[in-house]
Every structure is written in C-alpha cells, then in structure tokens.
C-alpha cells in the first residue's frame, strides 16, 4: 500500500482513514497542501515490519508517527504460561540478530531471582557468546546501513563475516540461528577446543576486514555526505527519550552497563567504551565500528583467561543436570524429571537484571510468587525505546534520509514488538 | 547511594511512602533492587523531585510496566524503572491501582520516554494514564476490545476478537 494523498488541510482525516482500512484517498486540489506518506510495514528498507506515517511538505519531513505491533506475538503473556526453562527458546526470537545475548540476559535475570551463580567457566563462555552476538548484530547493521545509503559492497562483506560467526555458533551451540544455548545456572554444554580455535581464528582476521570497510566508506564522499548531520539527537534528548546503547553513546553520553553495573566477568576484562559527541548518523557509525573492535579485544581476553571446570552450577533443585548424567545416574534422572515437570521454584519476590545488549539495555523484570512459572515477566526491549526517538531524528530532515536514519538506529522489530 | 535516596525521599515525602522493599535471594552475589511503593496521589511530585534534584538526578526512565496481581484490592501495579546516569543507580517506583479506579497520572511531562511505555501499559492492562497526549493502543489494533495481559484473558485468545481485514 503506497499512498500519496494530498489533503485539503486535514491530515487527521488521512491518518484516520489509514488507521481504519487499506485505502487510497484522492483529493481535488493536489498541489496546495501537505502530503502524508505511508512507509511500510512491507518495505525493504525498514528492516522488518516497521510502519511509518510521514507528513511531508515538499521533501521536508514535518512529522512522523511510527506504528508498531505487526510482529506482536505476546511473549510476555506466553512467559506467564510456561516454566522458566521453557522460555529460554522464546528469547531467541526477540532480537533475532543476536539470540545468544538474549539467552544470556534472560538466564541472568532468573539466576538473580534464584540467588545462584554460574561457575567461572560458564561465565567466561557467556561473555564470549554475548560479544559474538554483538559482533553478529553490528555486522548486519554495518551492511544494511551502508546499503541504505547506496554502498552495496559493504552489505556483502558484512554478511560474509557474519556467516563466519554463524559457523562458530554452529560448532558452539549446534545451531546457527535460534541458539537457546544458556541454561539457568550455566550453559547447555561445554565449549569445545574446536569452537575455541574457530573463535580465535575469526577474531584474528576480523580487525583487518573492518579496516577495509572503513577505508571503503570513510573516504567516500557520498557516504559521508549522506550521514553527516542527519538524524541528530542531542545529549539531553537522548537521555530524556530513554535511549540506550550505541546510539546513546553516539550522542555523547558515556554510559555502558558492562562498566557501570558490571555483570558476569566484565570486571576482570579490559575494554574501552567508545563515545562520540555529534549525535548524527555518522557518529553512530563511528561508535559501532569502535565497539566491534572492543568486542574483539574482549573475546581475545576471555579466550586467554578461559578457566577450566564445570559449566553448570551444583544446585540440583534449580539447575538441570547434564544430559550424560541423566541417562546414567538415578539421582540426576529424578532431578531432571522434577525440574522438567514442575519447574524451578524461585522464592517469591521481584527482581530486574539488565545487560548491555547490542542495541542497548536489554533487561528482564520478573515477578515471582514462588511457583514454577513467572507471575509476570516484562521485557525491557532496547529497540522499542530507541525507536521512540525516531520522530525527533526525522523531523525537519529530507524524505530521502528516512531510510538512512532507520538504518543508523538499527531497530529489530522482533524485539520492539515483543 | 541507596541510603541517600531513601533518606532524601523520606525527608521530603514521609507520608507518601507506603513501603520500601529490597528483594535479594542471595545478597552476597547480587546487588538488591530497591522498590519504593508510593501513594498514587503524590506520584507526580515525587517523580518531579527525583528527576530534578541536583544530587539524585534520576534523569532517565528506562521502563514502565503494569502488573496484574489479581487481588480483590489494589489489583494493578505500575512500576517505574528509573535510572540516574550521574550516580549509576537504579530505582523502582511503584504505585498501586485499584480495579475500580484505573486512572494513573501520566509522567510524560517529566520523562518523555513514558509516552510509548504508558501506551503499552494501557494496551495490555487498560490502565488509563490521565493527561497522556496520545493514549492509543500500541501493539493491538485500535478496535480490539480486551486487555490481553490481564489474568482473565485466556492464553489462546478469544475467537473472533481479531477480525481479518476487509477485502
């Protein structure tokens, strides 16, 4: 439905008509007025099912109303009807570009609720998982953002690198996309030497590839002119709109949960938080590119420090036993049966745990009544809050920049729509 | 920081704080979350104070959610997840909402981020945020008649409640 209707001074009427049904409006004097443009939900450049209603005066954007909900699957309702372990698979489908990071964030929240902690080896592997997920997500962003402003080569390069990460996930978790790798109190299975070697080989060659991309884009006048000064958000606006993640840091706010409220073993790792003051699309490009290099550093350190030991905590009432033992030991078989059928029963209470995901603060607020299922589970989805700032970024800009700005915000609708 | 927040809050709003909860299943491993339940009528003044106070500066609303406790009194709760970038401290404010009076004052004037978050809570629970500039459903279609995250709404949905678009 591509609609270009010229109104007789009543954009509300057009909005109403668009809300009501799929329709094309025609008005009599076409040249006099503002135009309302509908973009999406089926539009290749919106990166999913995002729909925007844009009011235009010529080529200038006067206002923008995002419309969400086309991918709403009710994950918060589903969470109330299944036990804590079952829900891990659903977290894959939130931000489907970085499923491993979602798995980690969810089990950390459940572990906080139960008051248990994964053993050190599992924590290091989780850090590696979360950073690989960040790399995969940023590589897709890099490719699609460059493609949105016309640089198609970078898309192919970005996806080539991401494919290598997916191969690592294949070795590490057994699947390429919907990983469901973590478990409450640990991870599904140990990281093999093969996976360690594959990760090492990958991060050794990635910085050179990123440099190639930077060479290609940052000396490209078209790319710079299309990104510089486009989609600006000031520091104050960014904080007030609840933005988090790279796009907050690109507005000059030095905030990263990995450093400010450390979780897992980030305290023991050495890394920088890239911050850029400009707040435009180009600043977001710089911040994410630097972040990828820092992720490489983090993974390298984590691989060097990777301790040996078990990958699941020793707490039979909460933590699923390893499959090998379930098949050979009576006690583990009973524990497995009880956990699968009745779930873990964390104490009554409510807690919140957030991690710095690839898009921003990804948090889970869990209300427990001491039963096998959460009473209420709220997902704090970074894409949702970041998208809310889109009208600010677009206002006063050109219609041709809409696509470039969406690309630089990097929303994932699976997460924004829940 | 926790003590300082509580001290400042109780000094200024002694009568409006109903409860202070700190849940910790294992305080040795994890920092506790501070949840402060306040009176609904004083919510706006407390939020304004927390946002503008030079020392506390809770300048970022990170999340806002409704909870259906399914109790005969004070059935719903609204939780505000606010963060202070200056102090790196997170605070949860909670108000209780009775089933017969679903109105909650809006905080859009204090934190603009509340706009979509309040729309989401309205969409899922039917909580009415008074003074909200654009209180429409955000996920479900506008003509949908139910509030899906209420406990009485069945998981399978209600047949016929979501009509297919007209051809």
Image (tube, coloured by chain):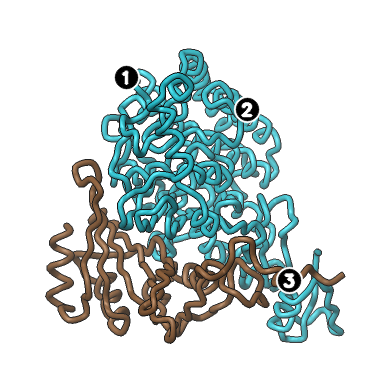
User: Which residue has dot 2 on it?
Assistant: A163
- Secondary-structure class at tag 1: loop
Marks 1 and 2, how far apart at CA: 28 Å
Left or right: residue B124 versus residue B59 is right
Residues tagged 1 and 2 counted as in contact (Cβ below 8 A) = no
Parent chain of label 1: A
Parent chain of label 3: B
- Secondary-structure class at tag 2: helix
Can marks 2 and 3 be said to lie on one chain?
A: no
User: Which residue has dot 1 on it?
Assistant: A307
Does residue A44 sit above or below A64 in this rendering?
above
Marks 3 and 1, how far apart at CA: 56 Å
Percent of width and height locating residue A390 = 55, 62
User: Which residue has dot 3 on it?
Assistant: B160
Percent of width and height locating residue A350 = 33, 57
Q: Colour of chain B?
A: brown
Packing grade of label 1 (10 A; few <14, some 14-19, many >=20) is: some
Query: Of the residues tagged 2 and 3, which is closer to the observer?
Result: 3
Can marks 3 and 1 be said to lie on one chain?
A: no
Query: Of the residues tagged 1 and 2, which is closer to the observer?
Result: 1
Q: State which quarter of the image contains the C terminus of chain A.
A: bottom right
Left or right: residue A195 versus residue B156 is left
- Secondary-structure class at tag 3: loop
Does residue A311 sit above or below A109 in this rendering?
above
Does residue A394 sit above or below B103 in this rendering?
above
User: Which chain: cyan?
Assistant: A
Parent chain of label 2: A
Left or right: residue A297 versus residue A168 is left
Determine if residue A278 is in view: no
């Amino acid at each position: 439905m591509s609609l270009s209707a010229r109104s007789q001074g009543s954009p509300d009427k057009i909005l109403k008509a668009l809300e009501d049904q799929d329709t094309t409006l025609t008005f009599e004097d076409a040249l006099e007025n503002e135009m309302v443009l509908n973009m999406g939900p089926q539009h290749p450049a919106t990166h999913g099912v995002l729909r925007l209603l844009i009011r235009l005066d010529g080529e200038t954007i006067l206002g923008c109303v995002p419309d969400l909900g086309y991918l709403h699957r009710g994950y918060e309702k589903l969470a109330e009807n299944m036990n804590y372990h079952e829900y891990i698979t659903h977290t894959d489908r939130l931000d489907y570009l970085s499923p491993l990071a979602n798995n980690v964030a969810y089990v950390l929240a459940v572990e906080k609720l139960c008051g248990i902690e994964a053993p050190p080896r599992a924590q290091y592997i989780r850090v590696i998982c979360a950073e690989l997920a960040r790399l995969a997500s940023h590589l897709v962003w890099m490719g699609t953002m460059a493609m949105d402003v016309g640089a198609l080569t970078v898309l192919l390069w970005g996806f080539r690198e991401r494919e290598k990460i997916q191969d690592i996930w294949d070795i590490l978790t057994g699947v390429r996309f919907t990983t469901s790798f973590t478990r409450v109190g640990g991870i599904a299975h140990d990281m093999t030497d093969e996976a360690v070697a594959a990760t090492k080989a990958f991060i050794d060659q990635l910085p050179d590839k990123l440099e190639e991309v930077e060479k290609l884009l940052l000396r490209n006048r078209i790319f710079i002119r299309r990104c510089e000064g486009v989609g600006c958000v000031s520091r104050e606006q960014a904080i007030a709109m609840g933005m988090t993640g790279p796009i907050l840091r690109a507005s000059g706010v030095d905030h990263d949960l990995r450093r400010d409220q450390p979780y897992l073993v980030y305290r023991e790792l050495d890394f920088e938080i890239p911050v850029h003051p400009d707040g435009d699309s180009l600043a977001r490009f710089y911040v994410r590119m630097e972040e990828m290099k820092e992720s490489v550093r983090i993974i390298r350190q984590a691989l060097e420090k990777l301790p040996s030991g078990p990958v699941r905590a020793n707490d039979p009432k909460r933590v699923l036993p390893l499959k090998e033992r379930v098949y050979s030991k009576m006690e583990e078989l009973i524990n497995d049966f009880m956990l699968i059928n009745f779930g873990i029963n964390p104490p009554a209470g409510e807690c919140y745990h957030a991690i710095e995901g690839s898009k921003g603060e990804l948090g889970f607020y869990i209300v427990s009544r001491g039963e096998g299922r959460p009473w209420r589970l709220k997902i704090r989805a970074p894409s949702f809050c970041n998208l809310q700032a889109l009208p600010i970024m677009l206002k006063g800009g050109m219609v041709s920049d809409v696509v470039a700005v969406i690309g630089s915000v990097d929303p994932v609708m699976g997460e924004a729509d829940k | 920081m926790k003590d300082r927040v509580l001290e400042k809050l109780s000094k200024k709003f002694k009568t409006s704080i109903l409860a202070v909860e700190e849940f910790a299943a294992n305080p040795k491993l994890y920092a506790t979350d501070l949840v402060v339940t306040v009176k609904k009528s004083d919510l706006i003044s407390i939020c304004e104070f927390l946002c503008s106070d030079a020392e506390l500066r809770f300048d970022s609303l990170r999340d806002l959610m409704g909870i259906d406790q399914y109790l005969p009194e004070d059935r719903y709760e609204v939780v505000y997840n606010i963060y202070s970038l200056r102090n790196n401290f997170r605070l949860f404010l909670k108000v209780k909402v009775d089933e017969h009076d679903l109105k909650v004052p809006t905080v859009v004037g204090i934190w603009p981020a509340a706009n979509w978050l309040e729309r989401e809570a309205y969409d899922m629970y039917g909580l009415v945020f008074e003074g909200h500039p654009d209180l429409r459903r955000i996920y479900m279609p506008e003509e949908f008649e139910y509030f899906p995250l209420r406990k009485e709404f069945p998981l399978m949905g209600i047949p016929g409640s979501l009509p297919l678009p007209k051809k």
